[in-house]
Amino acid sequence: MIDYRPGEQKYFYGKLDLVIGMMLHSSVMAFGALTPEINVAYDLRNKNFAKFIGCPELAINLKELKSGILLERAKEVLAQRLKYQKKFADKVEDIKKKQELFFGDNIKGI
């Protein structure tokens, strides 16, 4: 368990190869650190975040969780870790561009 300030926590998440969690916060933090995260999704927020970042396969529905599924998915994601890092970096850049368009010049003063 990592319990530090957000910037420090993001640093540690960035040092990991894979995060497995249930809370949306762990998904967001891992995504921001460009670290793949498999979320055992117990609600729509978790599933929708995985869809939002373009990786619905990173959410495993809690009701469908069976022995072996999580391990197999973890192996698949680890094998494609660099692909996910690139995909996350591209999505982060896309989000930044959309934010700049939305806020315009006002974002520079923040």
Image (cartoon, helix red, strand yellow):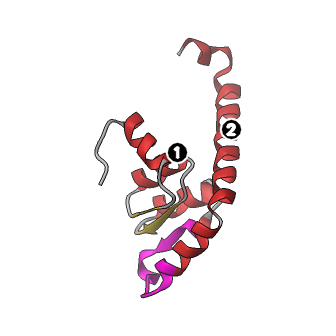
Q: What x and y, as percent, mark residue 52?
A: 61, 54
Residue 19, position in %: x, y?
45, 60
Q: Position of residue 11 (x, y in %)?
A: 45, 40
Whether 14 is among the magenta residues is no
Q: Name the residue at 62% across, 54% down.
A: 53
**Residue bearing the label numbered 1:** 33
The number of numbered badges drawn on the structure is 2
The image quadrant where one finds the N terminus is: bottom left
* Mark earlier in primary sequence (1, 2): 1
Magenta stretch? 57-71
72 is higher (above) or lower (below) than 49: below
- Determine the residue positioned at 70% across, 40% down: 94
Residue 93 disc label: 2
Check disc 2 and give the amino acid type.
Answer: Glu
Magenta run includes residue 61: yes
For label 1, the crowd category at 10 Å Cα-Cα, with few meaning under 14, some 14 to 19 and many 20 or more, is many
Tag 2 secondary structure: helix
**Towards the viewer: 88 or 17:** 17
